[in-house]
Image (cartoon, helix red, strand yellow):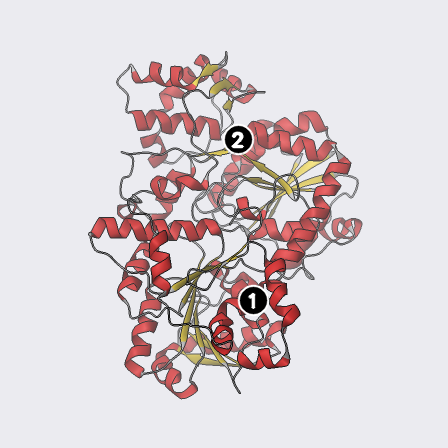
């Protein structure tokens, strides 16, 4: 796949690489007949859904379910393959909540829906003869399903989805599932090609670590999440501003995500980029920071930073927005900023939602954004740098998950200067911004609309039946092709090893560093930066000012680094400090 046009990638011997959803899937739909549909349907097809939200039901709307499982469920319904959908609640206490939840979802009204208990899953799979069991997240429960199928003599297929790969549980799940009695018609869907590549690298790492030829039996595919482009659609901007209580005469840049430096992105660089852009664009522009207030202390730090930067009157904070408010925010805004820096995210739904609402996206050149945001057509991607460490936190399984994500993300440096330049370009060149806005909406509807994604998923789930009906052999080993794609020497002990290719590149010795205005200010005063005790353990904070002094005049990275190492400092910690300074906008890379 090229990355410019994400589509379906399947690992089995007759699943080719589909470089575009519309072009390739339309070939089947244009030539399909009622008889073809009969091939992929039985009298009644039943779909079983394992718990959507483990432990509790938090919202009455599936789009709020964790890990994007609700988005994939909607796409499953849009395949039009299933007549009955059985939801399994984790506890008896959740029965009523689940029943209310499914009753409130309009797109479930086309199928017969019932709620069952996980306690009785072993009986239900026998009674109801499920065609497919959907495990919303790739976890050890997939191996459990395979064992249950074998023990009960049932024949259901298993579908699971990779949303976040960076947690140690994913490695455990992969290891268990390599040993589980999975079949080559079971399917693991990765919502981006980046995720697909990482899963193969993880398989290679496990083989190397344990010294055994663990097979990849189940099939893998790449089908993105789908959104409802009829819900996320352009609308009257004045009405949206009125609904939100915003001044329609002001122009808005929107950044939307959880207020969490741990599992979303650091807002500090966004603020620094906005400070720079506003100097060029003028006071008619404001920044909106919106999303769930997942970590209250971080939100308070953001407010403090805005006050210290003197732009608290130019930034609007909207925590815990409703679904209606979210759509209105997209419609009221003219630029969407998505500077993702965290390895836990492999897709980026908010960027797709913004595109669908006719808003061009300025995104980090990072993971799934490389596929969803087409540079110069639907938005702009900003260079993103990530190091490869050899001695810092060598085994992620020994570190707290949240801490590991924070420490890694603080070295993923979205180029602040280029981020500001991209905002300035879209804010000052109206025809260009409008052209990208049109391209964004077109791409969202052509590639990511939930009905289109449902058609893609239908193709993935029925290709074996279609080929069998056409007299083609479907008995090959799915794992054979996938195994050939698994790298032999993948080292993925740390997240820097595993996710290094998510970024544009690492910094190299020839890169030039220069201290920014913000960094220069830091030479004279203490800047408000977000730090935890663990970050202070890895950063050489006493080197930040010497680095900024050394780079007042543009200096090659190799010279700056060599001078710092002469004092006997740890090389990886020196690099950690340099990347952190670049991330915070204290240093600019290769200034133009």
Q: Say which of 351 and 183 sits in front.
A: 183
Q: Quadrant of residue 377?
A: top right
Which residue: 40% across, 64% down? 219
Q: Residues within 10 Å of mark 1 (few under 14, many from 20)?
A: many
Q: Say which of 254 and 136 sits in front.
A: 136
Looking at the image, residue 205 sits to the left or right of residue 283; the answer is left
How far apart are labels 1 and 2 at the CA level?
35 Å
Residue 252, position as x, y percentages in the image: 70, 40
Residue 387, position as x, y percentages in the image: 39, 33
* Residue behind mark 1: 75
Mark 1–mark 2 CB contact (< 8 Å): no
Q: Residues within 10 Å of mark 2 (few under 14, many from 20)?
A: many
- Callout 1: SS: helix
Q: Say which of 28 and 459 sits in front.
A: 28
* Residue behind mark 2: 415
- Callout 2: SS: loop
Residue 37, position as x, y percentages in the image: 59, 78
Q: Earlier in the sequence, mark 1 or mark 2?
A: 1
Vertical relation: 582 (above or below) 443: above
On the question of residue 327 being in view, the answer is: yes
Which residue: 31% across, 64% down? 177
Looking at the image, residue 497 sits to the left or right of residue 30; the answer is left
Residue furthest front as drawn: 471
Q: How many marks?
A: 2
State which quarter of the image contains the C terminus: top right
């Amino acid at each position: 796949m090229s990355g410019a046009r994400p589509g379906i990638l399947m690992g089995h011997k007759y699943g080719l690489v589909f470089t575009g959803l519309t072009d390739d899937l339309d070939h089947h739909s244009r030539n399909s007949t009622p008889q073809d549909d009969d091939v992929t349907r039985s009298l009644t097809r039943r779909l079983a859904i394992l718990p959507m939200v483990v432990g509790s039901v938090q919202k009455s709307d599936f789009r709020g379910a964790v890990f994007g499982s609700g988005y994939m469920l909607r796409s499953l319904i849009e395949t039009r393959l299933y007549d009955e959908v059985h939801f399994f609640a984790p506890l008896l206490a959740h029965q009523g909540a689940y029943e209310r939840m499914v009753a409130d979802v309009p797109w479930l009204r086309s199928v017969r829906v019932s709620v069952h208990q996980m306690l009785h899953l072993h009986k239900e799979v026998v009674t109801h003869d499920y065609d497919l069991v959907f495990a919303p997240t790739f976890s050890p429960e997939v191996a459990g399903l395979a064992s249950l199928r074998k023990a009960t003599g049932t024949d259901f297929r298993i579908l699971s989805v990779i949303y976040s790969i960076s947690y140690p549980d994913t490695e455990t799940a992969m290891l268990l599932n390599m040993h589980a009695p999975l079949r080559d018609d079971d399917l693991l869907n990765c919502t981006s090609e980046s995720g697909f590549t990482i899963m193969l690298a993880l398989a290679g790492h496990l083989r190397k670590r344990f010294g055994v030829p663990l097979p990849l039996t189940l099939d893998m595919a790449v089908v993105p999440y789908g959104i409802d482009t009829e819900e996320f659609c352009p609308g009257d901007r004045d009405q949206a501003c009125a609904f939100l209580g915003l001044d329609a005469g002001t122009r808005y840049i929107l950044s939307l995500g959880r207020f969490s430096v741990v599992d979303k992105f650091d807002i500090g660089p966004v603020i620094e980029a906005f400070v720079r852009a506003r100097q060029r664009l003028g006071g008619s522009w404001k920044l909106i920071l919106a999303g769930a207030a997942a970590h209250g202390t971080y939100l308070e730090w953001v407010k403090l930073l805005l006050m210290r930067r003197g732009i608290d009157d130019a930034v609007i904070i909207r925590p815990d927005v409703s679904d209606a408010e979210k759509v209105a925010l997209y419609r009221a805004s003219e630029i969407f900023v998505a500077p993702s820096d965290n390895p836990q995210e492999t897709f980026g739904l908010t960027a797709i939602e913004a595109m669908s609402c006719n808003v061009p996206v300025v995104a980090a050149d990072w993971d799934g954004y490389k596929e969803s945001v087409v540079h110069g057509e639907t938005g702009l991607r900003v260079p993103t740098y990530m190091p490869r460490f050899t001695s810092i936190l060598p085994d992620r399984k020994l570190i707290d998950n949240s801490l590991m994500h924070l420490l890694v993300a603080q070295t993923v440096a979205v180029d602040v200067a280029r981020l500001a330049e991209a905002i300035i370009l879209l804010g000052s060149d109206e025809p260009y911004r409008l052209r990208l806005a049109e391209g964004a909406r077109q791409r969202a509807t052509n590639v990511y609309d939930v009905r289109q994604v449902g058609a893609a998923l239908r193709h993935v789930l029925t290709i074996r039946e279609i080929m069998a009906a056409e007299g083609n052999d479907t008995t090959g080993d799915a794992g054979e092709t996938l195994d050939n794609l698994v790298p032999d020497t993948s080292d993925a002990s740390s997240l820097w090893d595993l996710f290094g290719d998510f970024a544009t590149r690492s910094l190299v010795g020839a890169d030039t560093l220069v201290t920014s205005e913000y960094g220069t200010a830091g030479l004279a005063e203490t800047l408000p930066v977000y730090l935890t005790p663990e970050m202070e353990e890895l950063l050489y904070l006493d080197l930040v000012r010497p680095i900024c002094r050394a780079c007042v005049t543009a200096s090659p990275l190799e010279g700056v680094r060599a001078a710092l190492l002469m004092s006997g400092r740890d090389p990886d910690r020196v690099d950690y400090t340099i990347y952190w300074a670049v991330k915070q906008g204290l240093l600019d890379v290769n200034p133009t």
